[in-house]
Image (spheres, rainbow, N blue to C red):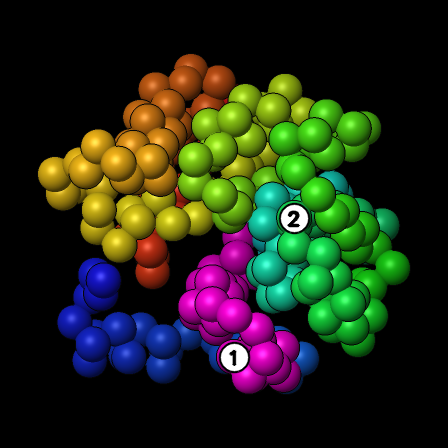
Amino acid sequence: MDFLPEKLDDYVVAHSQDEPKLLKELNRETWQKVLNPRMLSGGFQGRVLSMIAKLIQPKNILEIGTYTGYSALCMAEGMQSDGVLHTIDKNEELYDLQRKYFDKSTVGSQIIQHVGNALEIIPKIDEKFDLVFIDADKSNYSNYFNLVIDKMNSGGVILSDNVLWSGKVIEKLNPKDIDTAALLEYNKLMNSDERIETVLLPIRDGLTISRVK
């Protein structure tokens, strides 16, 4: 679902920073070799993630949902020189592709890959985070938030992707649509939890920015 007219969207992209060469390579290889390439953050949203990270300058980053590693590399652009980025994905088949591009970057040694169930892995990571990006299975968004909120530093930011879910959040709910139901509850949670302040941006498929008080 397009939230802006195509010509206006093209103008926005044309007047935003272009993606770096390494990310162009990863973008291209993802579309050539990996299933569901639309899951990739892509050039424009990647620049949004990079800008947010550069404004925050996080020391510790957590990403839930690595896919091919594009968004991790975008956020790592703003990470402190001694920072660490933990990224979790359940698909072990993507591990080598992720590592290939992480190692091509200047921060490869600072990116730690975790493979498995994020609900089990997150409690085992003994860190306080300045930036968290939630972009995995929608049915567990609220569970992920509840796991990370006590691991956030004051002033830290939680980003949540796909919160508009192709506009399904404003359509009549299909009782069998578990993901949309979960996102509706999640969006309410992010706007009502007193530990955070939230703004939902209509960027691509919806991006929530939540600042921890």
For image coordinates 74% across by 48% down, the residue present is 115
For image coordinates 23% across by 62% down, the residue present is 1
Hey, which residue is sitting farthest front in the picture?
176
What type of secondary structure mainly makes up the magenta span? helix
Amino acid carrying label 1: it is: Trp
Mark in the foreground, 1 or 2: 2
Q: Earlier in the sequence, mark 1 or mark 2?
A: 1
> Residue 180: x, y in percent?
30, 39
Magenta-drawn stretch contains 70 = no
For image coordinates 80% across by 51% down, the residue present is 112
For image coordinates 55% across by 31% down, the residue present is 144
Asked whether residue 132 is in view, the answer is: yes
> Residue 77: x, y in percent?
67, 62
Which residues, given as a range, are shown in magenta? Answer: 25-52
Magenta-drawn stretch contains 42 = yes
Front one among 95 and 106: 95
Front one among 7 and 147: 147
CA separation in Å, label 1 and label 2: 20 Å
Label number found at residue 17: none
The residue tagged 2 is 90
The residue tagged 1 is 31
Amino acid carrying label 2: it is: Lys
